[in-house]
Image: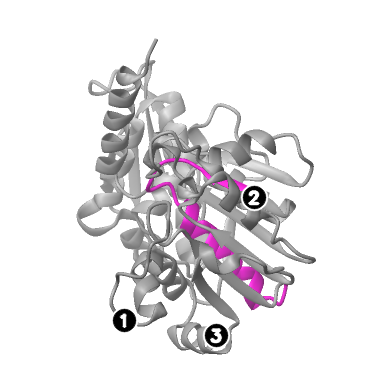
Amino acid sequence: MTGFRGQSVTGPGRAQRSQGVSKRIVVPFEDNRFLTQLLGEFDCHLALIEDRLGVEAHAHGNVIILTGSEPAVGLARDVLEQLYRRIANGEPIGAGDFDGLIRHARQETPATDGQAQIATRRRVVKARTPAQSTYMRAMERVDLVFGIGPAGTGKTYLAVAYAAHCLERGLVERLILSRPAVEAGERLGFLPGDMRDKVDPYLRPLYDALYDLLPPEKVERDIETGVIEVAPLAFMRGRTLANAFVILDEAQNTTSMQMKMFLTRLGENAKMVVTGDPSQIDLPPGQTSGLEEAVRLLQDVEGIQSIRFSNTDVVRRDLVARIVTAYDKASEGQRPR
């Protein structure tokens, strides 16, 4: 079942946050069961549309009344109807789905192929921003992708999601997930326990993503058999990583030599994704980040693509985006003119 385009009425309406002539449209939906999911608890999804698009949205019976500028109410209608169709097809939706569709629709030059997605056994991961869509499609097209940007933009999670997708479909034989274990030098000896006890705390974000995307019993089994390997960067030296999907996380904390060592591990039928946030480099003063250097040196090399995220791509929550923006402004003020 789907929603139907409603009639539109142009009129003065109430004061709108959007600019332009106020327009009122009525969008009917056939099934009230699906409409309840579309509205969200206490109409929270409508509140999100109001906040993001500057429109007024009210539910009445089996219709939603939208008031605002013509472009804004048209976009709001499209978002509501797309998500209604997803619900009718049995897909769960949440605030993130509204946010993702709005962000994609608001870009000035919309992608012709729409919102990218990755399917794993446990969930379907949909891009929440246009940059995420570009990133996900880059992983499909080329063998080496750099994902660069602030925390909360989904760089690592999406890389693990696509790696899990490739493993489940037999496109690769194993997953290798790595990151610098501690700041720059990987000094693990002073920590208690065996080697896994020493490195696991630093690799926990990778484990979290795996357990969210794959059945827990499969993750445990694949780790035991070596199909999934989560290891610090130091363990990569001297290896050739073939028939694998390889991810290097927190790559801003690699040295030039470490980055070169890692990139040259790439073997036959392998894909590699390198993620990092250049604003959070923990290397000693004067030490060049291997991530920044690699992106600069390899920018024109065929088969490699770099995707840059900004604070507008933060999807963790609005407060995180505001925190990132505040720190960016502070760091810009400290740079020499």
- Does residue 11 show up? no
Q: Which residue is mark 2?
A: 260
Q: Estimate the spatial distance between the alpha carbons at disc 1 and disc 2, rounded to whole Å.
A: 30 Å
Q: Which residue: 67% across, 45% down?
A: 113
Q: Earlier in the sequence, mark 1 or mark 2?
A: 1
- Please tell me which residue lies in front, 40 or 154: 154
Vertical order, 189 against 68 (above or below): below
The amino acid marked with disc number 1 is: Gly
155 in magenta: yes
Q: Which residue is mark 3?
A: 222
Q: Residue 169: horizontal and vertical position, in percent?
A: 68, 75
Q: Residue 39: horizontal and vertical position, in percent?
A: 31, 54
- Please tell me which residue lies in front, 153 or 111: 153
Q: Which residue is mark 1?
A: 193
- Please tell me which residue lies in front, 312 or 27: 312
Vertical order, 333 against 111 (above or below): above
Q: Secondary structure at mark 3?
A: helix
